Amino acid sequence: MKAEKKILPDSASLITAAAEHFVATARAAIAKRGVFYVALAGGSTPKGLYQKLATSPYLEQIDWARVHLFFGDERCVAPTHDDSNFKMARTAMIDLIPIPAANVHRMPTESGEPAEVAKRYAETMQTVMDGAAFDLLLLGLGPDGHIASLFPETPALDVTDSLTAHLYVEKFDSWRVTMTYPVINAARQVIVFIAGEAKAAIVNDITTEAVTGLPVQRLAPENDYYWFMDKAAAGQ
Ligand SMILES: O=C1O[C@H](COP(=O)(O)O)[C@@H](O)[C@H](O)[C@H]1O
């Protein structure tokens, strides 16, 4: 399925559009099913969106007690480490919104080896969601075409029998845990959130198909699929 592209003039309007979209998606899910399951992206790009969601008028429009926050991927560091995706989201948003602590499901990176972290997180997803699909799964896009921590030429790309996978990323000399394609593709809505000039080259390579087979190109969402971009990332 091809993504519907939403291209906003600049970073501020991208963040506003994405925040409005997030709120509308959360409200619709809660109205229909009484709960909003969302998986957050890490890295630096979504930070402005998370900060926005923690402010008026977005903050008050969501019944946060009915929201369950998960993470699409995590770096295998302590939750207080500057590289932690959880720490980024916590400082930008989680500490500032009235969400019950029990509804914040971070990857338990302190609980052991990466394989154990991945296994435990899959168990948490199963226990909390009981097979339901994510209402919204947010992804970033790396300059090498990775999404979540599905990096090019890693075995995690081929994992289809588990909700999560662990992998070693050579270029960062670090271990990661990631949700797998079956989870991502089954989400009711997938958004790839892309901002800034630094992403223009990879976006161009993907849209012109100058390269093929990158992790982002292997996505096959079964439901709604959007790319939210600013003009700088879109190369306009
Ligand atoms: O390593 C990661 O990279 C991607 C993209 O990050 P960005 O800083 O370029 O926005 C991110 O989506 C992922 O969660 C993160 O762990």
Image (cartoon, rainbow, N blue to C red):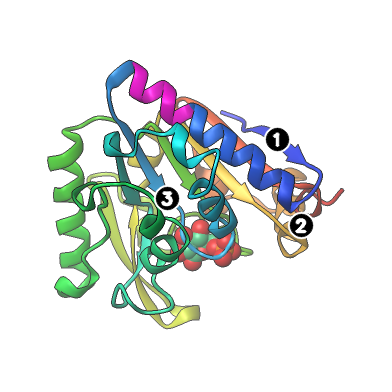
Distance CA(mark 3)–CA(mark 2): 22 Å
Is residue 222 inside the magenta stretch? no
Query: Where residue 207 sits: x, y (%)?
Result: 73, 44
The amino acid beneath tag 2 is Ala
Relative to residue 150, is residue 66 drawn left or right? left
Does 173 sit above or below residue 47?
A: below
Marks 3 and 2 in Cβ contact (< 8 Å): no
Query: Where residue 27 sits: x, y (%)?
Result: 42, 26
Q: Quadrant of residue 74?
A: bottom left
Q: Nearer the viewer, residue 31 or 183?
A: 31
- The quadrant the N terminus occupies is top right
The answer to whether the residue bearing label 1 lies less than 8 angstroms from the nearest atom of ligand 1 is no
Relative to residue 143, is residue 219 drawn left or right? left
Query: Where residue 28 sits: x, y (%)?
Result: 43, 21
Residue occupying image coordinates x 27% and y 58%: 106
For marks 3 and 2, the one nearer the N-term is 3
As helix, strand or loop, the secondary structure at mark 3 comes to strand
Query: Which of the numbered marks, if any, corresponds to residue 200?
Result: 2
Count residues near mark 1 (Cα–Cα under 10 Å), then give few for <14, some for 14-19, many for 20+: some
The amino acid beneath tag 3 is Leu
Marks 1 and 2 in Cβ contact (< 8 Å): no
Bounds of the magenta span? Answer: 25-31
Q: Residue furthest top?
A: 32
Count residues near mark 2 (Cα–Cα under 10 Å), then give few for <14, some for 14-19, many for 20+: many
Query: Which of the numbered marks, if any, corresponds to residue 40?
Result: 3
As helix, strand or loop, the secondary structure at mark 2 comes to helix
Relative to residue 223, is residue 141 drawn left or right? right
Q: What residue is pinned by disc 1?
A: 6
Distance CA(mark 1)–CA(mark 3): 19 Å
